[in-house]
Structure formats: structure tokens, C-alpha cells
Image (cartoon, grey):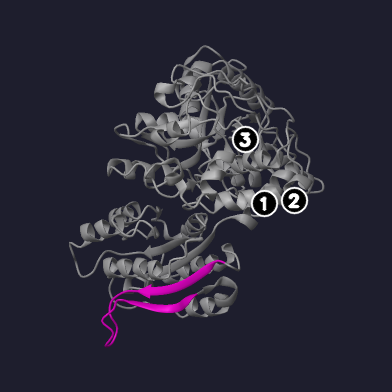
Amino acid sequence: MPIVLGAVAVVSILLGVIFLSGPSESPADDGCLKLGMWSSDEKAPVLQEISRRYKESDRKTDGKCVDVAVSVYSSQGSVDVLSDAPGADPNAKPDIWSPSSRYWVDSVRTAIATRPGRVRSVPENPPTLATSPIVIAMPEPMARELGWPEGAIGWRDMLALAQDPNGWGSRGEPWGAFKIGKTNPTFSTTGLLATIATATALSGSNEALTLPALDAPEVASGLRALESSAVHYGKHSSVFVRNLYAADQEGRALEYVSAVALEEKVVLDYNQGILVGDPPVKTTPPKVKLAAVFPTDGTTVSDNPAIVVDAEWVTDEKKRAAEDFLKYVQEQKDLFTEEGFRDGEGNPGKRHAVENGTPASPSFRLVRTPAFEVAQGVRNLWQRNRKRANVLLVVDVSRSMEENVDGVGRSRLALAKDAAMLVPEQLTEDDTLALWEFSSPLGTDPRPWRERVAAGPVGVVRDEFGREVEGLQPTGATELYESTRAAVADVRDRYDPTRINAVVLLSDGRQEPRSDGLPSLEDSLRSGDRDRPVRVFSIAYGDEADRDALEKISTAARGGYYDSTDAARIQQVMADVLSNF
């Protein structure tokens, strides 16, 4: 039935995690009271514009104008700061906080409760600034084949296509296997919300999920079957959006993925040529638009709450100013709807129209919020039933890797080894893992790469992997292109259709000897065996890495590109890469 998207409490994790040091300061002292606000990334530009208008308005607190500096800050980092977690940045002191979901507000409350003696007030029912439903985004021809926009389409339709060995052929279409894209529920708002909605639909209950419901065999088996069609996972939706756009520009919009769980706003932006990311990319609209499918058997909504932080650095004056600013924000409904959000009551804006990819008044079932511990159970259920991975880690050991990293006192290779040790820790025991090093040929071997650990289950190769990583030594030049081509070929030769088959490529340099072989490598990656796709997730490591080449390689292979120009951040970047599995 038609649903009004109210200010609902939904369980989620921040979509797209961006790490900054905290709120920025105005360049000059203009006499205004300074406030810092932390926001989730997708609505930060709107809040920054509202802050500008607020400062220029006549509203004052205690006779002073108020200047609110809006910054993007990671969800878990925010929870750590606000709950005084060990290792949290002591200099990070926000006055206002607005994550994408109340999940994080609940997380702070839960974390505080585990620390005896800590007293900090966390509101039970914070205001909602804007809403954005989680939808199944599909290339429009695929959505229309299922009956969009009028027809009833749900998670069970996705499951039926995923389980059918003929895929789209079962509907007389030449689009091959049904493939889904989904961010990792351990890290991502959208991924968790989509998994909650899927589990609720599979449970067949109209009530909120419970822990016993998660134990039902049909829930686990259905989720496992749907996850088996995943192309890969990831921490951010931007990887899927940019891969979709690259495929679209090559005339292959229907090849990369059939359906992706996204926020409705991201779909509206994509169809305008705005690709979510940090920063967002503005380009020409895609040739094939996305359609926002609202699952009739249930979906959830990002509710974007906001709270005034209860902390010793938030003075009474700041508290009064923050409360007034949040009142002002809630008055700016039109700004949010102009940017593709629905307002705090769920009302659409002018952009919400079928011709733009989403119906203004969709009919769907609103999934009720499960308890906090149930949300944790959903993440555990996904981890047990996610698609397993077949990963080859390829590490650049060229001579430049022996250079020390400024401010750290250790070499690039030493830090890269620490990052490599995360791989078996973040994968599961039954994922497949292998290790190569590459530089330039050694001795009589004409190949620039060398196998250090043959592919095997993580539980079997873990110890050997650790020993071989520790034994990596810098030598030679950087024969990037030939090594990448060989790594992809190796994974394809032992391709496992039940797994995400991927190369994780870490390099700190440029192709040596100089070569014009990049276009040829890109062509081979784009035109490789489409029935046996091998994704390349590349890491540009340090300030001398060939970022352009590595990004092109990952785009051609429909993987993901990660920038670790700051070599000291390589462990965090590696963790981000591993979220794809």
C-alpha cells in the first residue's frame, strides 16, 4: 500500500566512510561563535549550504552570529570519540553529529553503557533531518522486464533469478546470469539495510526481525543463494556506481551487474551524471538510466538523525546555538528534496519522478526496525553466508619500496608487510588466498613476478603466508603491466564460479622500463572471458605510484581503485580493499 516515509528509526551503517581530522575552522575570527558538526557524506554538501545561509541570516545566540563548520567523519570514529573508546582522537571534539542512521546513535549509547563511570546523555528519539529509502537499483531495461514501475517486484524476485541457472535467459533476455552488487554489511549503511530487508522478506513475518527468525533455515538458505550472485562487495557504493558508469560508456551497461542496493538519492544523482564519491564526479548522464525498484516485500530507510553532543567541550552557549541551528536545518526541507532526499516526513521533491528513475509515491512494505542485537545478528548471518573469495595478493617489491616513509621511520615495504598481514585476518578460513611479488626479472627467470604462496584455503596457507610476507625484499624495477596481465591470467586459469575471483595489486611505482602497453592491457581486461570475470583492486601506494594507470586497470577490470598516497595509511586502505570480499 502507499507508504508515507516517516521519521523512522532504522538500523544502518554509514554509506561511504571518509576519514578527516575533524571540523574545519574559519580562516579568520569574525566574532561568531564557532561550532563543529560531523555529518555522513551524502548530505554534507546540503548541510554546508544550510550553514552558510544560517550564518548570513539574522539568527543569533546570546547576541552572537553562529558559524557551523560541517565536516565528514567516519561513523565508527565518531562512536569511538563520543564514547571515549581507547585510542580515540583526543583532539576530535564535535558539537553536533548527524550520521546517516540511528544505528550509530544506538551504538554510542551501547558503548557508553559498557564503560562504568561514564555519564553522557544520548537522546532516545533525535530529530530526522531527511530520509532516503534503500532501493534495488537496476538498469532500466532490466527493471522494465520485471514490470517496473507499476509491477510488484521484491527481494524474492531477485532470489528467483539468482537461483535460476538460465538467469535472464529464463525471461527470454540475452543478459546472461543475474548478478547483484552490494556493499559490505559490516561497514556500510546500505549493505546492512538491504540485508535486514532481505532477511525480513525471507522470514515471511510482518513483524520486526528477531534472533530466532534469523535461525530459520529458509532465511539462511535464501540469503546464501542471493549472495551467490554477488559480483563483489565493498565499503562504499561509489565503486559500483563508477563501474556501472564505465560499463555504460563502453556500451555494456547490462553486463556488469543486474541489481545494486543503493539509496534512492544515489540513483537520482546517477541519472543526472553525478557519481557518488569523495569528491562526487559530475559528468554527462548515462546512456542507460537506473530504475529505483522499491521492494514490495520490504525495505528500509536511512533516517539521518542529528544530536547535540553531550560533552564537556559543549558549553551551555554552544548547546543553545546548536539547538537553534538544528531547528533551522529542519526548516530547510526544500534544500534536501532538491538534492534528491525526501524530507524528514518522507515527502518527495520535484526530482522524484519516474522519468528521473524513481516513483514519487511508491508502494512498498516498510521494514520495521529490529533490536540492536538483532542487527548485529544480521551482520553475523551475512558473514556466514556471504560469497567466498579467491584472492591473489600481488605486491610490488621494486627497489623504491626500501625508501623510508616520512614521520614513521620505517620503509614502504615494512609498512606494506603490516598491511599484507591483514589479508588472512580479514578473510575467512575457507576463502582462497595466494601471494605473488613482482619487480623485474631475477637471474635466469625472464618473468618479473614470482609466486611466493600457491593458492589454498586461508586456514591452510596462513602460516606460510605470514613467513613469505616477512621474507619480501626490495629489488629491481617495476614491470607493472606484464605482472598484472599474468596475475589476472593465473586467477582466471583456476577460476571458481562460486567465489569472487580477484587480484589485489599494490604498487608504489610506474611501469619500468617505460612502455606504451597500458591501452593493450586495458583492452585485454575489458574483453577478457566474460563468463570468468577477474576483478582487479589496485592500491596506489606512496606519492610516486602511477595513480592514473592503476585506476585505469581497475576500471577496465571492473574492480576498484584505492589511493594510499599517504603511505602511513596503508593498513586502513588495505582494510577498505578487503571489504570487497
Label 2 Cα crowd, 10 Å radius (few <14 / some 14-19 / many 20+): few
Left or right, 76 with respect to 540, comes to right
Name which residue type carries label 1: Ala
Residue 277: % across, % down: 42, 40
For marks 1 and 3 on the same chain, the one whose residue lies earlier in the sequence: 3
**Part of the protein shown in magenta:** 431-455
Q: Where is residue 251 in the image (x, y as percent from the top left)?
A: 28, 42
Q: Which of marks 3 and 2 is in front?
A: 2
Q: Is residue 484 magenta?
A: no
Q: How far apart are marks 1 and 3 (CA)?
A: 25 Å
Farthest-out residue, top: 58
In the rendered structure, the answer to whether residue 37 lies left or right of residue 411 reads right
Q: Which one is in front, 140 or 191?
A: 140
- Tell me whether the residue at label 1 lies in contact with that at label 2, contact meaning CB atoms closer than 8 angstroms: yes
- Per the image, the residue denoted by label 2 is 215
Label 3: element kind: loop
Instruction: Judge the density around disc 3: few (<14), some (14-19), many (≥20) Cα neighbours within 10 Å.
Output: many
Label whose residue precedes the other's in the sequence (1 or 2): 2
- Quick one: 188 or 120, which is closer to the camera? 188
Farthest residue, direction bottom: 444
* Among the two numbered marks 3 and 2 on one chain, the one whose residue lies closer to the N terminus: 3
Cβ atoms at labels 1 and 3 below 8 Å apart: no
Residue 509 in view: yes
Checking the image for residue 220, the label placed there is 1
